[in-house]
């Protein structure tokens, strides 16, 4: 099963290497990882998406806890949460198909953030499956370049994980 | 007080009451060595950084205090790596200090630069690259705290040369602030009650005790629990001595070369109380068949150990000593006479023992005599191989921290430098290293260290002119094709003499005891080259990945009524056909 973990870490040099190294060393698969600072000075938050069964997830969580720089781990897979990912997509856009491309982007409430002679850059934000769906629809026009942030997630309501 | 980073480092080590550093200097760590020149801390110059790491490890295992080792950047630091991995696998507290190139050279492939924090990340409990001199006191304080608390382990501090040279105002913190590091000490009361209930219902309980018991100083509690609830007890290689070998409840060591009664008891028990163990594959064999009928209680300070290899029913996370104390209060006295009877029968049918190999000197015999001559009181270190297993089987340890061996990593070359560390921690106790001709040569250069420091370490080389354990596997699982396991060996006695130590050579059984007595009476280091039967095997043996029903070599151990060490039968007289065939199916690699 796919799990989403929110991991608070001390913003020490090497902390990302420690977490990523642990995954590969212990044979766990990371699907995505995104890191950034938080409301707390010196504390960063990682959102990790990993495939694991229950036993693997337990091991993974316990091993992560052993890292001195890891402060807190929450499995928010089952929580009501806001999940977002951002993608930038550079698409072939010839005069002939430009309108169609713009329509697809529009349906997904994406934005065109750069316009070139023969290409466009679209920006889309949303849950992973929405981003996925838009990419699929744009594929026939020819994607020249694609970059995704990986998922970030936050539990709904007043509760916070810290 | 104003001082350099290097001086602050040494001052911090003094604050931690470090009495000795095992190390080796070089360019990037010179300013630290310069500061050390003015310190009361003793420095022991090993002849290889690996020796320094193992010596610090042996010091820690023998004393319970953290060991400290030091090396320069690049090759000095990479030479520590095997020692750190050894300590990490066995959860031994070490603080390692390495020099690093100056900050502005990092990442430029500077002379003697290596990414030491990167290299050691998976083999340390934690590590630091010091970015500014102001951080040195805090980092040293944290390093010792992390190394010695919770599940102990090695911590490395990588100190760039220019950071060591910078000037700071020194003050040593009283406390650490590590919000991400809070080991759980007290077991959950509900879990402890449940464990007590399980114990009250058990008819065939077994205590399975590991190195965590030694780390926690919980030997007395283990013994009290065993006695109160009448629980036969097995100690892993890492825990030999944590339970007295002469105790009537002692089962011996479990696992691949464990006693028959320990392995059968683990297999047949209805309650397994595992304390400070990690269900290593050398103990469990095939995990799916391990202890199939038992309810399992697992007490460990590291939550990640629980359920890692074997599913447990009653996990208790906490310090072994504190948990066992709490459990002792809840446990009712009990007796299990039928169970003990069964175990006594197993033991009587298949006691540990060996047949003599014609006139050859038997390695097991040598270990028995080392035991007798030292009255079972020596601190014993071992290297890795057959001799290690014979030491574990035939030197019956009575106290924790008496038996020192590389269990997890199985590092050849560990034993002798570890003996040096153990001797420095215990100057007045006899320290013996049981080694093999292969292993001893992996750190033989430390003879110079032992001589220079006038350490009375006695090295007993069980010299079979083979990489014996490799040869045994080749005999059993690779059709006696001795690929690269036969080995010519130097004249160890002469090597010892060349270093300024005393060297002896023994070829006959009758000379064993006199040589050992001579060694004990001789000041300074002594090497005894015991030229033993070349093809003796370690029995019994459960092949890797197999289970207790595939045990091999029972006919290689004299049965009840048969005289031990009876002549005539050859111990290497071949493998029982059936067991050999089974073993071939399951053999892995060493
Ligand atoms: C550093 C290292 N290299 C290789 C091995 C694999 N190995 C395990 S036991 C062994 C043979 C050890 O030979 P020796 O020290 O002579 O002891 P014996 O088995 O003959 O008693 C070897 C090579 C190891 N454990 N450690």
Image (cartoon, grey):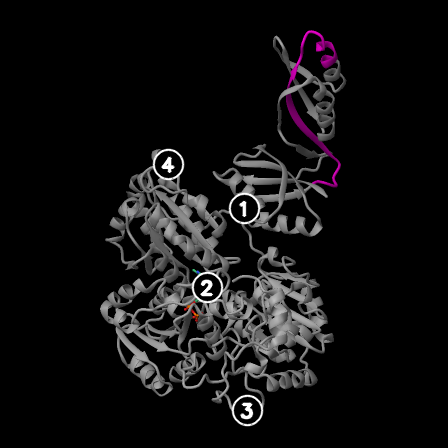
The residue to which callout 1 is attached is B179
Q: Position of residue B382 (x, y in %)?
A: 42, 70
Q: Tags 2 and 3 in contact by the CB under 8 Å rule?
A: no
Tags 2 and 3 on a common chain: yes
Q: Nearer the viewer, mark 2 or mark 4?
A: 2
The residue to which callout 3 is attached is B562
Looking at the image, residue B40 lies above or below residue B582: above
Callout 3: residue from which chain? B
Tags 3 and 1 on a common chain: yes
**In the image shown, does A84 or A51 lie closer to the viewer?**
A51
Q: Tags 2 and 4 in contact by the CB under 8 Å rule?
A: no
Determine crowd level at label 2: few under 14, some 14-19, many 20+ residues with C-alpha closer than 10 A: few
Q: Residue at left 37%, top 69%?
A: B437
Mark 3 to mark 1 CA distance (whole Å): 62 Å
The residue to which callout 2 is attached is B483
Q: Nearer the viewer, mark 1 or mark 2?
A: 2
The dot on residue B106 is 4
Q: Tags 1 and 4 in contact by the CB under 8 Å rule?
A: no
Callout 2: residue from which chain? B
Disc nearer the start of the sequence (4/3): 4
Magenta residues (range): A76-102
The secondary element bearing badge 2 is classed as loop
Disc nearer the start of the sequence (1/4): 4
The secondary element bearing badge 1 is classed as loop
Looking at the image, residue B294 lies above or below residue B75: below
Report ligand 1 position as a quadrant.
bottom left
Mark 2 to mark 3 CA distance (whole Å): 36 Å
Q: Is residue B247 on the magenta stretch?
A: no
The picture quadrant where one finds residue B560 is bottom right
Callout 1: residue from which chain? B
């Amino acid at each position: 099963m796919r799990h989403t973990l929110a991991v608070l870490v001390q913003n020490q040099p090497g902390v990302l290497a420690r977490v990523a190294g642990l995954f590969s060393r212990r044979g766990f698969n990371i699907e995505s990882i995104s890191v950034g600072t938080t409301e707390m000075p010196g504390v960063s938050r990682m959102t990790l998406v990993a495939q694991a069964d229950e036993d693997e997830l337990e091991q993974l969580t316990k091993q992560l806890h052993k890292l001195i720089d890891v402060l807190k781990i929450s499995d928010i897979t089952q929580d009501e949460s806001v999940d977002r990912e951002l993608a930038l997509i550079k698409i072939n856009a010839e005069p002939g198909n430009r309108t169609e491309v713009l329509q697809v982007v529009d349906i997904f409430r994406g934005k065109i953030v750069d316009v070139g002679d023969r290409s466009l850059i679209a920006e889309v934000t949303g849950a992973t499956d929405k981003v996925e769906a838009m990419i699929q629809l744009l594929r026939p026009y020819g994607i020249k370049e694609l970059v995704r942030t990986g998922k970030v997630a936050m539990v709904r309501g007043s509760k916070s994980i810290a | 007080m104003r001082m350099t980073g290097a001086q602050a480092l040494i001052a911090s080590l003094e604050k931690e009451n470090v009495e000795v550093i095992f190390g080796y200097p070089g360019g990037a760590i010179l300013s630290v060595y310069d500061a050390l020149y003015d310190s009361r801390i003793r420095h022991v110059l090993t002849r290889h950084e690996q020796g320094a790491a193992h010596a610090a490890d042996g010091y820690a295992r023998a004393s319970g205090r953290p060991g400290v080792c030091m090396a320069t950047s690049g090759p000095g630091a990479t030479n520590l790596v095997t020692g750190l991995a050894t300590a990490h696998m066995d959860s031994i507290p070490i603080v390692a200090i390495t020099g690093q190139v100056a900050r502005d050279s990092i990442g430029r492939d500077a002379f003697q630069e290596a990414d030491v924090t990167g290299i050691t990340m998976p083999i340390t409990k934690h590590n630091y690259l010091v970015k500014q001199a102001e951080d040195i006191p805090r980092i040293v304080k944290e390093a010792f705290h992390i190394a010695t608390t919770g599940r102990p382990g090695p911590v490395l501090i990588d100190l760039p040369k220019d950071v060591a040279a910078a000037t700071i105002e020194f003050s040593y913190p009283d406390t650490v602030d590590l919000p991400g590091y809070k080991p759980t000490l007290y077991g959950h009361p509900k879990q402890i009650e449940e464990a007590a209930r399980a114990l009250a219902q058990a008819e065939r309980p077994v205590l399975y005790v590991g190195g965590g018991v030694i780390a926690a100083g919980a030997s007395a509690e283990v013994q009290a629990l065993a006695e109160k609830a009448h629980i036969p007890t097995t100690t892993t290689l890492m825990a030999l001595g944590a339970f007295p070998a002469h105790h009537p409840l002692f089962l011996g060591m479990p696992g691949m070369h464990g006693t028959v009664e320990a392995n059968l008891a683990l297999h047949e028990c209805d309650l397994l109380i595992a304390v400070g163990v990690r269900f290593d594959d050398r103990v469990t064999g095939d995990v799916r068949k391990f202890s199939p009928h038992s309810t399992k209680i697992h007490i460990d300070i590291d939550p990640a150990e629980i359920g890692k290899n074997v599913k447990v029913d009653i996990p208790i996370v906490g310090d072994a000593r504190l948990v066992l104390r709490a459990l002792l209060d809840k446990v009712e006295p009990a007796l299990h006479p039928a169970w003990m009877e069964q175990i006594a029968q197993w033991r009587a049918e298949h006691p540990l023992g060996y047949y003599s190999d014609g006139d050859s000197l038997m390695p097991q015999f040598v270990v028995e005599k080392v035991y007798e001559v030292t009255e079972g009181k020596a601190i014993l270190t071992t290297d890795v191989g057959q001799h290690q297993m014979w030491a574990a089987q035939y030197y019956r340890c009575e106290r924790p921290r008496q038996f020192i061996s590389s269990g997890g990593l199985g590092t050849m070359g560990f034993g002798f430098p570890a003996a040096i560390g153990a001797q420095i921690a215990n100057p007045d106790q006899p320290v013996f290293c049981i080694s093999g001709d292969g292993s001893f040569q992996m750190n033989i250069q430390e003879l110079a260290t032992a001589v220079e420091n006038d350490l009375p370490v006695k090295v007993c080389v069980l010299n079979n002119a083979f990489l014996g354990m490799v040869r045994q596997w080749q005999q059993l699982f690779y059709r006696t094709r001795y690929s690269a396991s036969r080995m010519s060996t130097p004249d160890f006695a002469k090597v010892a003499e060349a270093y300024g130590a005393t060297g002896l050579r023994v070829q006959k059984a009758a000379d064993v005891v006199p040589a050992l007595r001579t060694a004990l009476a001789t000041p300074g280091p002594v090497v005894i080259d015991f030229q033993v039967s070349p093809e003796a095997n370690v029995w019994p043996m459960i092949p890797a990945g197999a289970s207790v029903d595939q045990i091999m070599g029972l006919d290689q151990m004299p049965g009840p009524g048969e005289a031990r060490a009876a002549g005539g039968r050859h111990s290497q007289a071949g493998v029982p056909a059936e067991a050999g065939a089974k073993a071939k199916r399951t053999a892995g690699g060493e």
